[in-house]
Amino acid sequence: AIVPQLVDALKDSPRTPTPELDGWIKQEAAQLAELAETAPSGMSPVHPARLIVEATKAFPADGIMVRDGGATTIFGWTYSQAKPHDVMWNQNFGHLGTGLPYAVGAGVADGGKRPMMLITGDSSFQFHIAELETAARVGLPLVCVVGVDYAWGLEVGVYKRTFGHDSLETGVHWSKETRLDKVAEGFGCYGEYVERDEDIAPAIKRAYASGRPGVIHVAVDPKANSEEMPSYDEFRTWYAEGQQ
């Protein structure tokens, strides 16, 4: 109730945009177009950068975006082609596991009127995967695009950087038999498995059209996911003072 009042109060105090604004907008648009063009394509499993490009291109213009995951989010903030008005993400918790509960909460608060997309990694998605039952029971228009490297990808990268590429990487890998699309079906949701770039957007479209919450299990390249995170050197200073 307070925000609309503030908006009304500010109507009488118009501000003109800074002269540099148009230039900044054009510069960013050019950067995003270049990223979309240069993100590795044609790989199977999918390169995580290409996953972000294709998924965010398929994001509904009026939708609610939710982020989760370690490496997935690092690729996400660099390569995202979407400009959502509403984004949910908890950076200060390390953004692991909050995505699905946030998406469910946002959908309930919105009354299920707007489509939602959660982009997450497999490890973070499994923190609260049972909330798919809530999403299905409430009937939320939610599509979860899950980048699956069958590992704690960010931690795999830390192992490699800290102990070398021959590290045992203890406790950071999932079974290759893990199928999150099948888990989704067990909760009454739509599920689909994808391992090629060109299949991501059509799968998302089918998930929205199903009338049920959906999970798109996208197999991503584990080596790229753990070794090619953009701006990782900056990211690691946020949590461990550069010691990772």
Image (cartoon, helix red, strand yellow):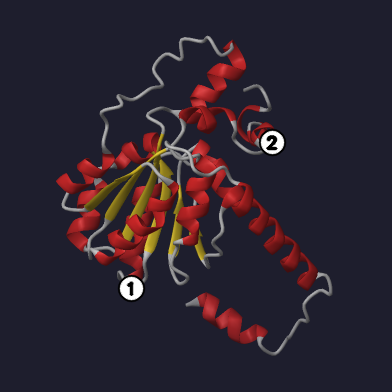
Farthest front residue in view: 42
Left or right of residue 80: residue 20: right
Q: Residue 31 at x, y = what percent?
A: 70, 56
Q: Residue 82 at x, y = what percent?
A: 54, 61
* Amino acid on which disc 2 is placed: Glu
Picture quarter containing residue 130? Answer: top left
Left or right of residue 28: residue 61: left
The answer to whether residue 91 is seen in the rendering is no
- Real-space Cα separation, disc 2 to disc 1, in angstroms: 37 Å
Mark 2, secondary structure of its residue: helix
Residue lying at 68% horizontally and 26% vertically, measured from the top left: 242
Q: How crowded is mark 2: few (under 14 residues within 10 Å), some or many (20 or more)?
A: few
* Amino acid on which disc 1 is placed: Lys
Q: Residue 77 at x, y = what percent?
A: 58, 49
Mark 1, secondary structure of its residue: loop
Q: Name the residue under label 2.
A: 234
46 and 74: which is toward the camera: 46
Picture quarter containing residue 23? Answer: bottom right
Left or right of residue 164: residue 220: left
